[in-house]
Amino acid sequence: MHAGDHDVEIIIPRSDATQVLALNPDQVDELTQYARALHVTADLSAALRLLESERIHRARLLDTAPDNQDLAAVRQADPTEPLPHLVLLATSAPEQQRRLETVTVAASDYDIAIITLGEHPAGPTVNLDNAAQVTSSTGAGSDIWDGLRLFHVEQQDADQVLELIRSAHGAPEPEPESQPAAQTTTAARSPVSVARSAPPAPQAAQASGHRPVHLQVLGHPTVRVDSQILETGIRGKGRELLTYLAVHAEGASRDAIVAALWPDVDHKHAVMRFHALLHETRQTLKRATGRIDENFIVRTADRYGIDPELISVDLWRFHTALHEASQADRDQDQAVLLQEAVDIYQGHLAAEASYEQAYEWIEPERETLRRQAVEALIHLAILYERHEPERALTILERARSLDRYAEETYQHIMTLQAKLGRPDAVRRTYRLLETSLEDLAVDPSEETQQLLWRLLHPRGRSQTGQH
């Protein structure tokens, strides 16, 4: 499943996921591969950044919707728009309290719910015993919780559910001896947080060896045969098919493919078009490479997928670089891998105007990848800002270009500009934020306004601190 395929999406920092779901870190990583309605972030800051971006997106939708529609009406008017109810489940942190409060304000208007382990920034606080029975509650509207018992599972039950999910996806049997070692390795490591992305199996095969075909889907969808662009033979729909299969590296069923590529065509004729397109695409790649005995798009059980031994995919290499960065122990290794990932990210998924209009299924996938690229750039900038601040600024500017509504990126840029003694640049960055947010008819947050004042009046800040 992907965003839009489910009604509720849970966003949870990785450390909280291990506690709440009663799973070890490796199990959490594995679960996120199969349960796509569970979005595990590196930390609370990343979770809030995702919610802030989504809130702006939803505010923009509501602002442009006719007759003051709510999100339910927007969903009904455009079923392709991915708008699941979002639930943030996280441990509250003092340094993130202001951002939590900001996200919580009017969260229900955007179908967002905030559940914190600890004091709630704006809602009721509920105390539970070990059996998940409510023992007391305080705050506005807390009376509805009195006497309730919340659903919960024990460790053994959680393990059984995970094993059921693994089996349903054809995963191999786990090795019992590997679990303690994995826990020890994770506990001993504390690298800079990066977006964790466990790559599907085909991506691992992309690490070495020559492949006759290279598929680029980040940016303009392009097929290359032995480094030469394949100009003819694969029509627009063929490129869409390859893009869809690149996104679904684990493979996709025929019915899922025809529903995505031909949503307005009756099933019988859509299936006929699929098989004709599949044959045409295969034949084109066979002729172009001279490998007439290869299929390039293979069928395994009831799923079709790109043959990773014959076709390299930039999207898979992007995911692999992010995944390896999340596993790296040293900052230097993380920086190299994150740089590789952002270099691969040449543009948004199928980011050509004509393709954006044609690929009706693509928006949730494009948005997820855009967020991953922005997070990678921000973490890369953090690694560079102490010793190479100019390079960090360049990286942050690229992050801003990918998401011009993300206030946290502007805040980071302004802070770094102030450290470099550039107050005029701080003001210009703030004005850029104001201009961007005008599209949404909103002003910069109070937090950003206060940051601007502190950065432009450092003496006043220090004098205030002395009192």
Image (tube, helix red, strand yellow):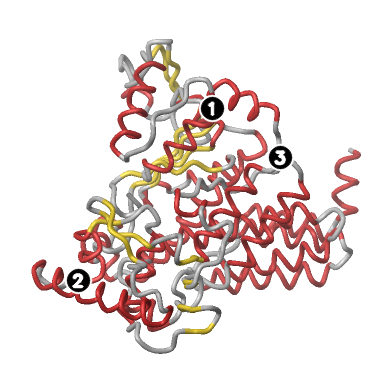
Residue 78 place in picture, x, y as percent: 25, 66
Secondary structure beneath dot 1 equals loop
Comparing labels 1 and 3, the label whose residue is closer to the camera: 3
Across and down, in percent, residue 143 comes to: 34, 22
Identified by mark 3, the residue type is: Pro
Identify the residue at image location x=47%, y=25%: 175
Seen from this angle, which residue lies furthest bottom? Answer: 232
Q: Earlier in the sequence, mark 3 or mark 2?
A: 3
In the rendered structure, which disc, 1 or 2, sits on the residue that comes first in sequence? 1
- Towards the viewer: 377 or 305: 305
- Distance from Cα at disc 1 to Cα at disc 2: 56 Å
Indicate which label's residue lies in the foreground, 3 or 2.
2
Q: Give the residue at mark 2.
A: 275
In the figure, is residue 355 to the left or right of 45? left
Q: What kind of residue is marked 2?
A: His
Q: In 3D space, how far apart are the residues under numbered discs 1 and 3 (Cα atoms)? A: 28 Å
Q: Which residue is mark 1?
A: 119
In the rendered structure, find residue 191 and report the number of the disc placed on it. 3
Separation of residues labelled 3 and 2 (CA atoms): 47 Å
